[in-house]
């Protein structure tokens, strides 16, 4: 099975190069001023030029209003919009129609009951991103380096297309892939040397860990 890999919160040419060299299918740019990974539409537009035709460029927003989305779409020209706030199904559908772009809706998971929210967005979002609920008092809706119980995802219908996020790193990705068996994974703080500082060596180590985990699965006769 093909595994999509998204490196999110990119801010430098060096980090993007490491992501593309590793085989990233998606690269994410965050438009949220409270985040140490925040970039402007102009910055993202320049950075994403390095990945045209190489990876899907994702614009990550948090409850952004139309004027901000307009500027992001016009300046960055993303391939996909990711909504990481409290956007309702109606709001997601409205944005999808307004910009004619596929959309991914992020949902925060802590317990089995949280998975019920997926039903509200099915048929609206093209894909889901399942992230851990932020710790109490956290300023960011994602990128907190916190995992959740991945075994909860075994209850999902097989046709639910999602990227797994939340606390992933080179040390735990094998367990995450084994328990959740997602079609895609998303990592941000797990390849950083400090808040918002992507480390090319850590990015390379993460891709190596993913390859090793998938190779081990194949060696055991399982479907990778």
Image (tube, helix red, strand yellow):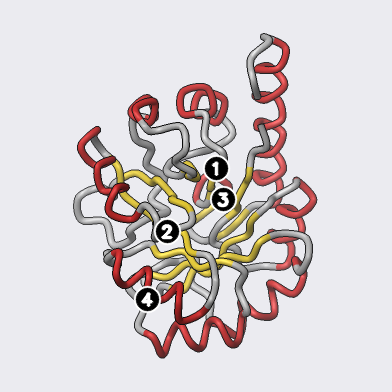
For the residues labelled 1 and 3, the Cα–Cα distance comes to 20 Å
The residue carrying mark 2 is 125
Expressed as whole percent of the image width and height from the top left, the position of residue 222 reads 64, 14
For the residues labelled 4 and 2, the Cα–Cα distance comes to 11 Å
The residue carrying mark 3 is 193
| Residue 64 relative to residue 8: left or right | left
The image quarter in which residue 173 lies = top right
Exactly how many numbered labels are in the figure?
Answer: 4
In this rendering, the label closer to the viewer, 1 or 4: 4
Q: Secondary structure at mark 3?
A: strand
In this rendering, the label closer to the viewer, 3 or 2: 2
For the residues labelled 3 and 2, the Cα–Cα distance comes to 33 Å
| Residue 39 relative to residue 117: left or right | right
| Residue 128 relative to residue 45: left or right | left
In this rendering, the label closer to the viewer, 1 or 3: 1
The residue carrying mark 4 is 94
Taking the spot 37% from the left edge, 68% from the top edge, the residue there is 92
Q: The N terminus is located in which quarter?
A: top right
């Amino acid at each position: 099975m093909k595994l999509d890999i998204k490196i999110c919160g990119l801010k430098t040419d060096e980090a993007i190069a490491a992501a593309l060299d590793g085989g990233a299918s998606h690269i994410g740019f965050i438009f949220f001023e409270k985040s140490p990974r925040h970039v402007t539409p102009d910055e993202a537009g320049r950075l994403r030029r390095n990945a045209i035709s190489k990876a899907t460029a994702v614009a990550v927003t948090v409850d952004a209003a139309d004027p901000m989305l307009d500027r992001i779409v016009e300046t960055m020209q993303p391939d996909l919009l990711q909504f990481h706030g409290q956007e309702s199904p109606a709001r997601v559908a409205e944005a999808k129609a307004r910009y004619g772009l596929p959309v991914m809706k992020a949902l925060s998971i802590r317990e089995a009951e949280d998975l019920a929210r997926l039903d509200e967005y099915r048929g609206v979002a093209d894909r889901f991103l399942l992230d851990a609920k932020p710790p109490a008092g956290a300023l960011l809706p994602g990128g907190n380096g916190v995992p959740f119980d991945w075994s909860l995802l075994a209850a999902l219908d097989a046709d639910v297309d999602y990227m797994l996020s939340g606390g992933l790193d080179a040390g735990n990705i094998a367990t995450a892939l084994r328990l959740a068996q997602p079609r895609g994974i998303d990592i941000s703080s797990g390849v950083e040397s400090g808040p918002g500082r992507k480390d090319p060596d850590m990015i390379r180590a993460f891709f190596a860990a993913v390859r090793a985990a998938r190779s081990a699965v194949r060696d055991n006769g399982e479907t990778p």
